[in-house]
Amino acid sequence: MGRPRTFSEPDVVARASAVFARRGFAATSVDDLVRATGVGRASLYGAFGSKDGLFQRCLSGALAALGPGSAPDPTGALDLVLVSLMELAPDDAALADEIGRALRRAGVSATDLGERLLARASL
């Protein structure tokens, strides 16, 4: 039997989400995630399987945060959605469909996404 976890998965997901949203998926290394979360590489792999698995958990949380009853300012969620749309969705039709459905369900428009992208660039 393995040792009990000494970290909170929701906390790890929140910290990793911030890193992915700021740096992007491709530019984020596992070492970046280890530093940001304070969780060792082996524990991250044990809990999430891979960097991809952790990103999927982060994105699932972001899409849920866009839903009904979500926080009034889901900018972190939108930032992660933008990363997903730009880096992953062009090569993953199922992911693009999932994001599209979540955006429509949440009433997030292309204008909303464009405004958030410009705000990220301080324009």
Image: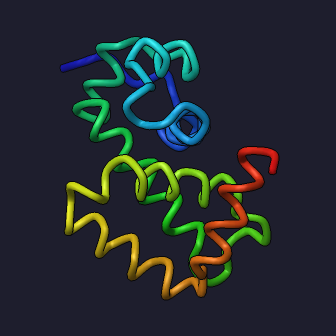
Q: How is the image coloured?
A: rainbow
The foreground one among 5 and 20 is: 20
Residue placed at 51% from the left, 26% from the top? 7
The image quadrant where one finds the N terminus is: top left
Residue 31 lies, with reference to residue 4, above or below; the image says: above
- In this figure, what is the number of numbered marks? 0
Residue placed at 67% from the left, 74% from the top? 112
Residue 109 lies, with reference to residue 1, above or below; the image says: below
Q: Residue 13 at what x, y percent from top left?
A: 50, 40
Q: Residue 17 at what x, y percent from top left?
A: 54, 41
The foreground one among 38 and 32 is: 32
Q: Is residue 19 left or right of residue 28?
A: right
Q: Is residue 11 left or right of residue 94?
A: right
Q: For residue 42, which quarter of the picture?
A: top left
Q: Residue 108 at what x, y percent from top left?
A: 60, 80
The foreground one among 54 and 21 is: 21
Residue placed at 60% from the left, 60% from the top? 78
Q: Residue 72 at what x, y percent from top left?
A: 79, 72
Residue placed at 45% from the left, 78% from the top? 102
